[in-house]
Image: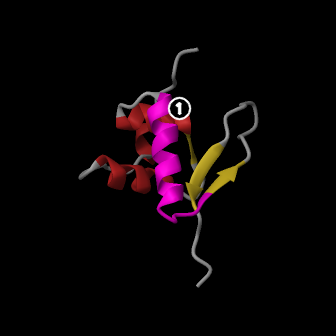
């Protein structure tokens, strides 16, 4: 299945280390899919999933959101602080 490229208008500009870029992409309120993260970061999907696991191990809470209508891919985002 070919990967779709995310819409350019809705994407933040990425700079710095890939871990910071990953956090920037995950900060979207709507969340993002592993496939979209992989395309933006130039990683394979298994590498992207491993990076999400490393963030969780570091104590960062990542929310898993339901797939958007018409897709089967879950979306992920950084959990909002409860402050």
Task: Tell me how the rendering is colored.
Answer: secondary structure
- Return the x and y of residue 57 as percentages of the image width and height: 51, 57
Residue at (67% x, 34% y) in the render: 73
Mark 1 surroundings: few (<14), some (14-19) or many (≥20) residues within 10 A: many
Magenta segment, prevailing SS (helix, strand or loop) = helix
Indicate yes or no whether the magenta region holds residue 83. Answer: no
Q: What residue sits right under mark 1 in the picture? A: 35
| Quarter where residue 80 is shown | bottom right
Residue at (36% x, 37% y) in the render: 41
- Return the x and y of residue 37 as percentages of the image width and height: 47, 39
Q: Residue furthest front?
A: 57
Q: Quadrant of the C terminus?
A: bottom right
Residue at (53% x, 48% y) in the render: 53
- Please state the extent of the stretch shown in magenta in the rendering: 45-62
Q: For this rendering, which residue is in front, 38 or 55?
A: 55
Q: Residue furthest top?
A: 1
């Amino acid at each position: 299945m070919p990967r779709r490229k995310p819409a350019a208008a809705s994407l933040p500009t990425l700079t710095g280390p890939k871990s910071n870029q990953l956090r920037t992409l995950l900060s979207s309120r709507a969340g993002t899919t592993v496939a979209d993260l992989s395309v933006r970061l130039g990683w394979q999907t298994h590498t992207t999933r491993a990076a999400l696991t490393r963030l969780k191990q570091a104590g960062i809470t990542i929310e898993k959101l339901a797939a958007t209508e018409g897709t089967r891919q879950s979306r992920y985002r950084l959990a909002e602080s409860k402050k």
